[in-house]
Image: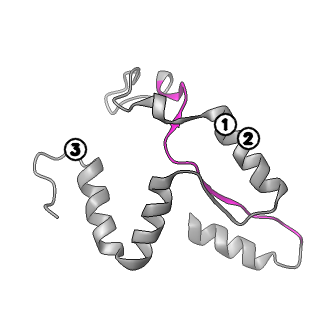
Amino acid sequence: MNGFLESLRIENLKTGLHVLTAAPGFTASNIRYSSLTKDGTIQGDTSMDEVKMMSAEEVAEKIITAIAKRERTLVLTTLGKNVLFLKRIYPSLLDKIAYKLFSKESNPLII
């Protein structure tokens, strides 16, 4: 997706089109009450601590501000900024960390 947005930005340099890439991170919202699990049941509760997350309204306000300032990129969390840094210096390690974090397999990769 980032590659597409970068291309879109470059192709429209002289048209005035503004392209913002926003990475809000995990956001507290009620979407889980309408999202479905793999077996088709409603997800309901989340295992994540939403108290530590920004609300959808806070994220929207920050995105609107970034659009008004015509920023290119918006990364809202420290974790997101750290991920971008790690992606630049050691992308294969980041792949393994992400796999281990999000994999539901019984024996995920060892880092």
Q: Position of residue 107 (x, y in %)?
A: 10, 51
Whichever of labels 1 and 3 marks the residue nearer the N terminus, that label is 1
The amino acid type, in three-letter code, at marker 3 is: Lys
The amino acid type, in three-letter code, at marker 1 is: Glu
Which residue is rendered at x = 29% and y = 48% of the image? 102
Q: Nearer the viewer, mark 1 or mark 3?
A: 1
Please tell me in which quadrant of the rendered image residue 87 appears: bottom left
Tell which residue pokes out farthest to the left in this image. 107
Q: Are marks 1 and 2 in contact (CB under 8 Å)?
A: yes
Q: Position of residue 29 (x, y in %)?
A: 55, 29
Which residue is rendered at x = 74% and y = 78% of the image? 10
Whichever of labels 2 and 3 marks the residue nearer the N terminus, that label is 2
Residue identified by numbered label 3: 104
Mark 2 secondary-structure assignment: helix
Which residue is rendered at x = 51% and y = 48% of the image? 25
In this view of the protein, which residue sits in the foreground, 3 or 28? 28
Which residue is rendered at x = 33% and y = 66% of the image? 94
Left or right position of 68 against 102:
right
Please tell me in which quadrant of the rendered image residue 60 appears: top right
Q: Quadrant of the N terminus?
A: bottom right
Residue stretch in magenta: 16-32
Separation (CA) of disc 1 from disc 2: 5 Å
In this view of the protein, which residue sits in the foreground, 53 or 4? 53
Residue identified by numbered label 1: 58
